Structures are given as structure tokens and as C-alpha cells.
């Protein structure tokens, strides 16, 4: 569904992304992990051309991403990011309906689809008339997901979508999303710096460092056969944290 | 309604038309330019700088400079056009600046979402960025609204009627009630319009379409009223009578208007015009008649300085020939009085210093202060006086003509340039110094008729011709006094004159030549 070949982007003379290649199949979720500045977000944004690549190729659903105008490419790809970016001057229903309006759906059909989507992301239909400012952070991000899914894309890009949420809300949203993407068989690329989140949600994990894809594989493969010490340490962090948490909670008991 | 209020619908509707048209044009221009600037950041300092420079030009000067500018382009230099252009330029900056600020202030996350959802640049701008920048843009429009309502009062001197007619006319005729009406009406209009625009803004911001629509409809209704109330007059084009900015001119304009009205034609008065604005307007057919003075035409338009030894008739004959040949303008009547520039001092000063003639001033001038109106020191007469008498004053001050007499009465200045037909010369016991070397030309008041009217309306020409020799200097002073001292309207003073004139049969035109030279 998503094929990336030799993707490269330079800012000045330093490459932000350097010859990255991978493939994501239908129904599969690839998590890109790595430190800040490792190039994971830039890689993601080159898939829907929010950032134009200097070299390399992106193929989405069998079509070269450069073969069509960027705005048409983007209408077929769901995009969710930490900033959410709900339109403050539009109601929840109108926000979710934006992709449908761009595709020229009639109002009544769009209205029914919006209710369907709110149900899908587990939001009360009564919220439809509210404005974004009146929602909690978790509700806002659910609306963001509903909007990204409105036009039934088969490909989703997610850039740290849950990073700004409190732990309980994040946990609930992660579970909702995991159910959704399996139900809809989405091909997804998910950028996160939270290795635990990546392990919990991803079919495969790609580790990035200094613009390069260092290793890609199933979480268990990465943990058992890491490419180098750093990957090993990275994959070990959730376990280390879990041990620490267990010790502290046990000791206090 | 009586008194000044009778004219309120006319002036207010003209003011509203001017304001709304200028704002509409200003917004229509500034918003797209603001969008462009926000896209091409390198343009920002240039465009905002330019708009800022326009803002620093004094408003009155900006409007005044439109007059020669438009005339040189062959466009109507007086009337609504120069006023409108000036106001549009002035309204640009606040709207432009706020458009740019508003667009820059849109949350980058929202813009990223708009792009990622597949909006084109245009959809992004129209559906997301402009709606979100709207409150800031509207705040700019509110600023522009209040400014424009205030500045529109300055359109009066360039020939566009507005609430400024109350203010300028009231200041010149010492009628504080009139000034007050103009100021109060302008303030009320500014507040009202601001309220309506802010209703639109908060309606949009708080997602209350009814409030926004209410504000919008209010503005629309006001515009509709202004356009129908002031009704671009149907039927025959009225004869337009002009006046400069002092009492005598207001009264004379009303006398001309009343005289033309006797022919059954509709008349419109365009008062408070700048001195040369009035002449240009006449030559270009924007007004049809007004009263000017031979000396003024002689020096400022014909560029002549020497008049020594020439009689009133000789100057008049040359002016008459020049007007007809160069501009097709006809002198319809010579009214019978002069309104000359003259130098006046207090009577005690004249006595103590032994002043009788202008020449007597020469040795004393370095210790004296001379005050005059705005234009005198720029005119040929002053150079001619300077040359003829070798006058060098300690200080020269320019001020509003209506303040000259107060200044000399209060001993703040020693010598003023007065106008010979002004009643206040007698009232304040001023002594006029004799111009024995004839440095200042004669200033016969003449009724000028523009080329089109002179050609097409012989009846009007004939009616105005009957004013020949009918107003001597005593009569003129009496008429001005009615307005300045007794606070009657120029129209009322003129009506008395016309009433009295109708009782007296017109003099034989041949006998109407002005009195021999002094």
C-alpha cells in the first residue's frame, strides 16, 4: 500500500532523511521510532508531500505520489498529528465533514457519514454541534481521527497523535485506535518517540537515527536480534521502566 | 426643522455616501494586498511602509493635493472624486496592517491540517485563514471606519459636501451652533457605524449569524438611506454656485443662487472651496458661477505683478479679456465694491507712531509683527509690496483669516492684512494704511460665469447681469455684519437683499461701471 524507495531530504547540506526505504502492506502498522531530529517526522511528511523529497520515490496504493497534484494525493491519505489542527471556527460536525465537502459530497449524505464517524471514534452525537474550544484534549483528538477517516482512506499517517494527552486518555485512545485500524484494515505509518507505544501498537518497528533507517522488523525480532547496542538499549527501555515500576509499587505494598 | 438642522439630511447623507464608498473601496483594496503581502513576505516592509507614509501626510494636505493631481490627469479635480481618493488612501493602512497580522496569527497547526486534508491554496485561504483572521481584520475596519468618518469632514474644502460644511461654514461665520451640529453628527455617525461593524465582528466570532447579519443589514440600510435621501438629483442639472471660505463669499453665493433661482432653474451651492480650487472648478465646468476679485485673478492666475498707475477700469478690462480668451469665462456683473488686501493697524498705534501710508512702516517694521492669512505671503502682492516699500518685519505670521482681527485687537500682532470690505475694520477702529505707490492692484468683486452656462443659459447670464453695480462696500459690510455679528444665516441675509433689490428697478447697465480709481 505504501512503498518508499531511497527517500532523501536535505536542509542545506545536511541530510534530514537519507535514503530511507520501506514497505507497508494493507492492514499493517509501521511505527517509526527514534530520537528528536532523527528524521522520522520528515519521512512521514514526504509520504503525503507536506514536505517535498529531494530524491527517491513514494508509491501510495500503486500510484507514484509525484504523478498527481499534492492536494489530490492528500485527500486519499488520512493524517493525524499531535497539534490536531481542528478548525476553531467550525463545529465538530463541520470539522469532520471537511474532507467530504472537498470531495463534493451532498450535505445530507455527509451529515449521516459524520454521525457514523462520531460513533466509530466513540463520541456522543450530541457533541456534533459543539465547537472545538468546548472539547477536552482527548475529545479533540478523537474528532481529529474521525476527520482523518471521513473519506474512508486506506492509508493513514500519524505523527505522535497521542503525545500531548494525559496517560489515562492516551491509553483509551490507543486501544480505540488499535481496534479501528484493524477493523478498517488500514495501512498506517505511526511516528512516535515512545517505544512502549510502538511495541503496543505496531506490527513492525523502524528505528531511525540521523536520517537513516537503522533497522526495521517485528518488535520481537528487534529485541532479540538488535542491529547494534543502541537499538538494543532503545528496545529495552519499556522493559526497564516496567521493572522499575513493578519494584517501586511492590516495595510500597 | 429650522436653522442649521434643516440641512442635516443633505450633509449627513453625503457624508455617509462618501464614508461608505471610501471604506468599501479601501477594504476591497487592502484585504487582497494584505493577503499578497502575507504570502510574499519580502513585500511586507515595502507595502506597509508605503501605507504608513501616506498616513503621515496631514489629511487636509492629502485631500488638497488630489485637486491638482487629478486636474493634471484631466479628471474632475474638485468634488467627490478627490475626497474619495484621499479617504481611500487613508483607510488603507489599518485594514492592511490588520489583515497581515490576522493572517500571520492563524495557528500553524490549523494550516497544517488544512493542507493535509487536501485543500488547495485557495480553499485554505478562503475556508480557513481568512475566516480565522476575520476578527483582526474587522478590528482594522473599525479603526478605518472611525478615522474615515472624521476625516470626511475635510472633504468640504475640495468641493464634496459633508458634515464638514457645518464645521467650516460655522467657523467662518462665527456660528458655534453650526460647528456643534457638524461635530455632534460626525461623532454620532462614527459611533453608530462602529457599533454596527462591531456587531458583525462579534456575531462572526461568537458563531451568532443573526447578530452578524443584523450589523450587516444596519450598514446596508444606512447606505440605502444615504443613496436615496441625497438622491442623485433627477431632471435638469442644477446650476452650481461656488463660494470660497469666508463670510462675504457665503452671502454672495446665496445672492447668486437666489438670483439664478428667479429664472426657475434649480440651484446647488458648493461652498467653502479653496481660493484657486474655485477658479479651476469654474474653468472645468464643475461649478457654473462664483464671485472673485480682479486683483486676485490678476496676480495669482495671470501672474501679473505690476499694476502701478493702472485704474480699476483698466485692470478690469484686461482681466475680462483674458478670462474670455483663455477660459471662455464671462464676467456677468461687476458688483460695485472692492475687497482689496490692505494693511491695517490699531488707531492708537497709528496715532502714536504717526502711520498714514505704507511707506511710513518701513523704518518701524523691523520692530513689528505682521499677520496675514494663509496665502498672502505666497502671493505676488506681497512680493510687490516688499519691493515697493522695502518692508522687513520682525516676524511674519500666517493664521486663519477669521482670527486676524482678534489677534490685532488683543495686541498680539501689530499689523494685519485686512480685507477692505470687511465690516470689522470699522468695528475695531482699525486704520488702513494708504498704498500710495499702488503696489497692490484693485480688487473689484466680479460675478464669473463658466463657459458652458454662458453659452447655454442666456437667461441666467442676464439675471446675474442685473446685479451690476448693486452692492457697494457699505452694503457688503452690512450684509457680512448680519452674519458675523447678528448670527443670521447667509441665506437669510441674502434673502433680505434680494427682497429689497426686487423693489428697486435695475439700473441701466451702461451706468454700472465702477467708480473711478482711488
Image: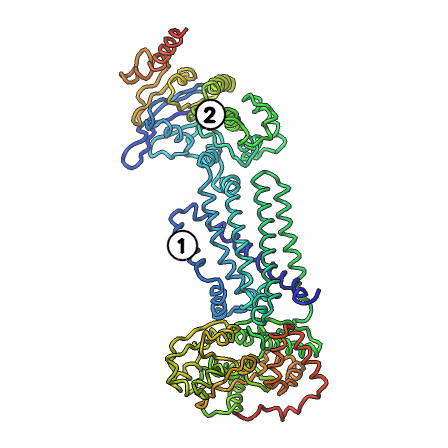
Residue A160 visible? The answer is yes
Residue B307 can be seen, yes or no: no
* Residue B378 as seen in the image, left or right of residue B278: left
Query: Dot 2: within a 10 Å radius of its alpha carbon, few (fewer than 14), some, or many (20 or more) residues?
Result: many
Q: Which numbered mark, 2 or 1, is in the foreground of this view? A: 1
B251 to A249, vertically: above or below: below
Residue drawn at (62%, 27%), measured in percent from left and top? Answer: A112
- The answer to whether B146 appears left or right of B438 in the picture is right
Q: Which mark is residue B78?
A: none
* Image quadrant where one finds the N terminus of chain A: top left
Reading the image, the residue beneath label 1 is B49
Q: Nearer the viewer, residue B120 or B215?
A: B215
Residue A132: percent from left, percent from top? 53, 31
Question: Are tags 2 and 1 found on a single chain?
Answer: no
Res B229 quadrant in image: bottom right
Q: CA distance from mark 2 to mark 1?
A: 48 Å
Q: Residues within 10 Å of mark 1 (few under 14, many from 20)?
A: few
Q: Mark 2 sits on what residue?
A: A155
Colouring scheme applied when the structure was drawn: rainbow
The C terminus of chain A, quarter of image: top left
Corner quadrant of residue A111: top right
Please indicate whether residue A223 sits to the left or right of residue B115 in the image.
Answer: left
Residue B153 position in % (x across, y down):
56, 62
Q: Compared with residue B87, is residue A13 higher up or lower down, i.e. above or below?
A: above
| Chain letter of the residue carrying label 1 | B
In x, y percent, where is residue A6?
Answer: 33, 28
Amino acid at each position: 500500500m505504501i512503498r518508499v524507495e531511497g527517500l532523501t531530504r536535505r536542509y542545506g547540506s545536511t541530510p534530514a532523511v537519507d535514503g530511507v526505504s520501506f514497505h507497508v502492506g494493507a492492514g499493517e502498522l509501521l511505527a517509526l521510532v527514534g530520537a528528536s531530529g532523527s528524521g522520522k517526522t520528515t519521512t512521514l511528511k514526504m509520504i503525503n508531500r507536506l514536505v517535498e523529497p529531494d530524491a527517491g520515490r513514494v508509491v501510495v496504493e500503486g500510484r507514484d505520489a509525484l504523478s498527481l497534484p499534492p492536494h489530490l494525493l492528500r485527500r486519499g491519505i488520512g493524517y493525524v498529528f499531535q497539534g490536531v489542527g481542528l478548525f476553531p471556527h467550525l463545529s465538530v460536525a463541520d470539522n469532520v465533514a471537511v474532507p467530504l465537502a472537498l470531495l463534493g459530497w451532498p450535505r445530507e449524505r455527509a451529515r449521516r457519514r459524520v454521525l457514523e464517524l462520531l460513533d466509530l471514534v466513540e463520541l456522543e452525537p450530541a457533541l456534533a454541534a459543539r465547537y472545538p474550544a468546548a472539547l477536552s484534549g482527548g475529545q479533540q483528538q478523537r474528532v481529529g481521527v474521525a476527520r482523518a477517516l471521513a473519506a474512508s482512506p486506506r492509508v493513514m499517517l500519524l505523527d505522535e497523535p497521542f503525545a500531548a494527552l494525559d496517560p489515562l486518555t492516551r491509553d483509551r485512545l490507543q486501544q480505540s485506535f488499535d481496534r479501528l485500524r484493524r477493523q478498517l484494515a488500514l495501512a498506517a505509518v505511526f511516528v512516535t518517540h515512545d517505544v512502549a507505544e510502538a511495541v503496543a501498537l505496531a506490527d513492525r518497528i523502524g528505528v531511525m537515527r540521523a536520517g537513516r533507517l537503522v533497522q526495521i522488523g517485528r518488535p520481537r525480532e528487534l529485541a532479540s536480534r538488535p542491529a547494534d547496542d543502541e537499538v538494543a538499549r532503545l528496545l529495552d527501555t519499556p522493559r526497564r521502566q516496567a521493572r522499575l515500576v513493578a519494584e517501586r509499587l511492590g516495595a510500597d505494598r | 426643522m429650522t436653522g442649521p438642522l434643516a440641512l442635516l439630511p443633505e450633509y449627513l447623507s453625503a457624508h455617509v455616501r462618501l464614508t461608505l464608498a471610501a471604506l468599501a473601496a479601501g477594504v476591497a483594496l487592502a484585504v487582497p494586498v494584505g493577503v499578497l503581502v502575507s504570502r510574499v513576505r519580502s513585500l511586507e516592509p515595502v507595502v506597509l511602509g508605503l501605507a504608513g507614509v501616506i498616513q503621515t501626510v496631514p489629511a487636509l494636505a492629502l485631500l488638497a493635493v488630489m485637486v491638482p493631481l487629478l486636474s493634471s490627469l484631466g479628471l474632475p479635480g474638485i468634488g467627490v472624486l478627490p475626497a474619495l481618493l484621499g479617504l481611500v488612501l487613508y483607510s488603507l493602512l489599518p485594514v492592511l496592517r490588520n489583515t497581515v497580522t490576522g493572517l500571520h496569527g492563524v495557528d500553524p497547526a490549523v494550516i497544517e491540517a488544512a493542507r493535509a486534508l487536501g485543500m488547495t491554496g485557495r480553499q485554505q485561504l478562503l475556508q480557513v485563514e481568512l475566516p480565522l483572521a476575520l476578527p483582526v481584520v474587522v478590528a482594522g475596519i473599525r479603526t478605518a471606519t472611525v478615522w474615515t468618518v472624521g476625516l470626511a469632514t475635510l472633504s468640504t474644502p475640495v468641493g464634496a459636501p459633508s458634515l464638514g460644511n457645518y464645521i467650516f461654514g460655522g467657523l467662518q461665520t462665527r456660528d458655534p451652533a453650526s460647528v456643534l451640529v457638524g461635530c455632534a453628527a460626525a461623532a454620532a455617525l462614527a459611533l453608530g457605524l462602529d457599533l454596527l461593524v462591531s456587531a458583525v465582528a462579534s456575531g462572526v466570532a461568537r458563531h451568532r449569524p443573526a447578530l452578524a447579519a443584523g450589523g450587516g443589514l444596519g450598514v446596508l440600510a444606512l447606505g440605502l438611506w444615504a443613496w436615496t435621501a441625497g438622491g442623485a438629483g433627477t431632471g435638469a442639472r442644477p446650476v452650481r454656485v461656488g463660494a470660497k471660505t469666508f463670510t462675504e463669499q457665503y452671502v454672495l453665493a446665496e445672492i447668486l443662487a437666489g438670483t439664478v433661482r428667479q429664472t426657475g432653474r434649480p440651484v446647488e451651492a458648493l461652498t467653502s472651496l479653496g481660493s484657486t480650487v474655485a477658479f479651476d472648478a469654474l474653468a472645468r465646468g464643475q461649478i457654473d458661477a462664483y464671485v472673485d476679485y480682479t486683483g486676485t485673478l490678476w496676480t495669482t492666475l495671470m501672474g501679473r505683478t505690476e499694476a502701478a498707475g493702472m485704474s480699476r477700469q483698466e485692470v478690469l478690462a484686461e482681466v475680462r479679456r483674458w478670462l474670455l480668451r483663455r477660459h471662455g469665462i464671462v464676467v456677468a456683473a461687476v458688483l460695485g465694491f472692492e475687497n482689496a488686501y490692505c494693511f491695517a493697524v490699531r488707531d492708537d498705534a497709528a496715532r502714536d507712531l504717526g502711520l498714514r501710508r505704507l511707506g511710513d512702516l518701513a523704518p518701524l517694521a523691523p520692530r513689528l509683527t505682521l499677520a496675514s492669512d494663509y496665502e498672502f505671503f505666497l502671493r505676488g502682492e506681497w512680493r510687490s509690496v516688499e519691493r515697493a516699500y522695502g518692508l522687513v518685519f520682525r516676524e511674519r505670521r500666517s493664521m486663519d483669516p477669521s482670527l486676524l482681527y482678534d489677534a490685532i485687537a488683543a495686541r498680539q500682532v501689530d499689523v494685519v492684512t485686512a480685507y477692505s470690505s470687511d465690516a470689522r475694520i470699522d468695528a475695531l477702529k482699525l486704520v488702513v494704511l494708504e498704498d500710495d505707490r499702488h503696489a497692490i492692484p484693485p480688487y473689484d468683486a466680479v460675478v464669473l460665469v463658466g463657459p458652458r452656462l454662458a453659452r447655454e443659459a442666456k437667461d441666467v447670464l442676464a439675471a446675474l447681469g442685473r446685479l451690476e453695480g448693486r452692492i457697494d462696500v457699505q452694503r457688503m459690510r452690512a450684509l457680512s455684519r448680519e452674519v458675523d455679528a447678528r448670527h443670521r444665516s447667509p441665506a437669510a441675509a441674502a434673502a433680505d437683499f434680494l427682497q429689497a433689490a426686487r423693489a428697486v428697478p435695475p439700473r441701466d447697465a451702461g451706468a454700472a461701471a465702477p467708480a473711478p480709481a482711488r
